[in-house]
Image: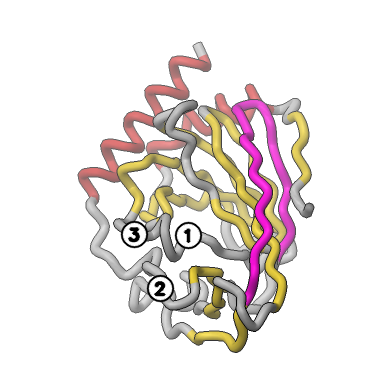
Amino acid sequence: MHTEIFKNHAFRSMRALVSSMIDRIEFRHHGIGVLQGYVQENTEPEIRVHIWHNSLLKPGIEISGDVHDHRFDMVSHVLHGAVVHEELNETPDPAGDHAMMALTHARAAADTAYHGPTTPLVGRFSVARERFVICAGNSYSFPAQKFHHSPLPYDLSDIAITVIEKHNQSELPARLLYPYGRDPVMAFGHRPDRTKIQSIVKYAKERLCQEVR
């Protein structure tokens, strides 16, 4: 297991800060069901605000395409709602039911709005899973080059808001882990719905402000 969960003692302060600035952040739509907006970029660490909502899921991505690793060590602080963090640990296996693909990270592929070009990687893999639910007021850390995904828990919250710290970012490509024989849905490459983005940001701010009062 690579996930470490811990109490965030600065939770209320962070929530108040994000509620005061969330409508001034420029967000992009990532197809795994999240809006991502940088608070601090090209620094160590980089910091993003994430807004999770089921309406942001690209069709089919939860079946093939949402399990990924990162090229940075991640710390995630849950400020509102709850997120599922499912860790997936792969083992090379000639009969395994998963395959891998290397991506071009979003910043390098900005001109195409797409994680491209992509490169299928050699091998098949079997997968062991461990699932966690992290609620507001808690944080977790997860290392680079380990696979996970973060489906929104339908039974706990309709929206979740997190702050992400990106530490020790490298130039290694991120990767997808997906069912063998099923092409993954790409998280980018679509035309963002600006009206939907604005509506979800407004709703997120309302939810944060209700809790800050």
Q: In the rendering, which numbered label is found on residue 66? A: 1
> Considering only order in the chain, which callout, 1 or 2, is on the residue closer to the N terminus?
1
Q: Residue at x 43, y 64 (%)?
A: 64
Identify the amino acid type marked 3: Gly
Which of 103/18 is in front? 103
Q: Which residue is mark 2?
A: 182
Tell me where residue 138 sits by quadrant.
top right
Marks 1/3: CA–CA distance: 9 Å
| Apparent side of residue 44 relative to residue 191 in the rendered image (left or right) | right
Residue stretch rendered in magenta on the structure: 125-144
Q: Position of residue 51 (x, y in %)?
A: 45, 41
Q: Between label 2 and label 1, give the one nearer the viewer.
A: 2
Q: Residue at x 69, y 37 (%)?
A: 139
Identify the amino acid type marked 2: Arg
| Apparent side of residue 8 relative to residue 29 in the rendered image (left or right) | right
Q: Which residue is mark 3?
A: 60
Marks 2/3: CA–CA distance: 10 Å
> Considering only order in the chain, which callout, 3 or 1, is on the residue closer to the N terminus?
3
Identify the amino acid type marked 1: Asp
Q: Residue at x 24, y 63 (%)?
A: 191
Q: Position of residue 42 (x, y in %)?
A: 60, 64
